[in-house]
Amino acid sequence: MAAFLSQNLDADFAAEIHDQHPVDESCLIAVSGGRDSMAMLHFLHHHGYRNLTVIHVHHGLRGEEADADEALVRAFSEKLGHPCLVRKVDVAEHATAERVSLEEAARELRYREFARIAREKDCPRIFLAHHADDQVETVLFRFFRGSGARGLSGMVPHAHRKVDGVELELLRPWLEIAGEKIDAYVANQNVPFREDLSNAEDFSLRNRIRHRLLPTLTEIFERDVRAAVLRTAELARRDEAWFEDHLPKVTKSRENGLDVATLRSLAPAIRDRVLLHWLRDEGVPDVGYREIERAVTIAVSTDHPAKENLPGGIHIRRRQGVLFLEFPKDSSEAIE
C-alpha cells in the first residue's frame, strides 16, 4: 500500500483527522507511556485537541518500571494541560482466574477500565495509537489462527465495541502510519517516552511475530512484506463491507434473541456472519471461529442440552425457537 510507505505525520494528515473528529469534541486517549501513545498525545495536542482526558492503566506488572511509566504519563499530561486518570488492575490475578495469557488478560482489563471511565465521563470516544505495524501483526496473528475475511480485515480506523454495556467508539487514526514515521516524529519533536523492555522479549505471541516471523518472511520473499499484508486486509475489508450491506435482518424476540428457524434457512456463510454481528453487538468479548461454531451448534442442533459456554462467563442457549444469551449476574447488573 502506497499510504504505508508515504504517509507522514504532518499538517495535511492532521487535517484529515480533524475532518473525522472535530477538535472541540471531548475524547479520551489511552496512553501507556510508550513511544506510540505519547506521540499521539503530543500530536493531537499540537494540532488543537484540548478536550482530551488521558487514561493510563497500570497493569500491576513490571514493578518499579510500571510505576515510572505512570509517573511519566502523569507529568506529560499535566504539562500539556490534560487531566490524567490512572486505573490500577491486577493482570496476573485475572490471567490465572480466567486461564488466559497475560496479554489477553491485560487487554480485557484495559477495555473494562475504558468502559468504566467512558460511563463516568459520558464520553465513549477514545483515541488508540495503533499503527500500520500493529495492523500487520494483527492480520498475521489472525491468519495463523484460521480467521476468515472478517478477521483478516484487521482493525479499522473507526470502530465500536460494547464492553459491560458501554458502547465504546474506538478511534485509530494512525492505522496507515508506519512505525518508522512515528519514530521520526518523536525524534523531531523531542517527545518523551519510556521503552517497555518486555517488548524486546519473546514471551508473547505478538512479540514473536514482530521479532521472528516478520524478519523471516522478509528474508524469504526478499522484500518488505508489510505492504502486501495490509493490502490483503484492505481487500478483506471491502468484501466484508459488501456482505454487511447485504446481510438479512433476523427477527429478534422479546428475549433479545434470534429466530432459530430463520437462522437455519440461511446459507452457512450468511448465517455465520449474522451470528458474528449479533454476538459482538451483544458484548461477547473476543468472538472468533470457535465461538461462532458453538453458536451454530446450538442453532442447528435439535438435541439437548441446548447450551454452550462463551467468553466472559456468558452462555448461549436455545429455547422455544429462540437463540439467546445469558450473562453473569455482575455483567447483567452493569448492563442495566
Image (cartoon, grey):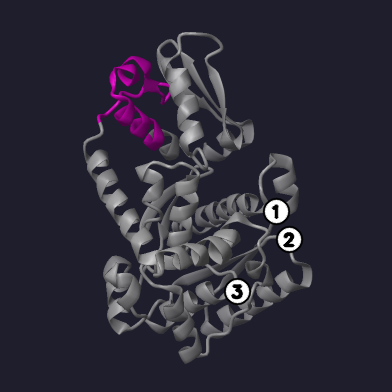
For label 2, the SS is: loop
Residue identifier under label 2: 60
Residue occupying image coordinates x 44% and y 34%: 279
Instruction: Give the residue type that dot 1 points to.
Output: Val
Residue occupying image coordinates x 49% and y 78%: 39
Query: Looking at the rendering, in which quadrant would you find the N terminus?
Result: bottom left
Q: Is residue 38 left or right of residue 96?
A: left
Residue identifier under label 1: 91
Whole-percent x, y for residue 274 in the image? 34, 31
Magenta stretch in the rendered image: 248-277
Where residue 33 is drawn, which disc sits there?
Answer: 3
Give whichever of discs 2 and 3 has the lower sequence position: 3
Q: CA distance from mark 2 to mark 3?
A: 15 Å
Residue occupying image coordinates x 31% and y 83%: 11
Question: Mark 1 and 2 residues: CB-CB less than 8 Å, in contact?
Answer: yes
Whole-percent x, y for residue 267 in the image? 28, 24
Whole-percent x, y for residue 240 in the image? 29, 44
Residue 77 found in image quarter: bottom right
For label 1, the SS is: helix
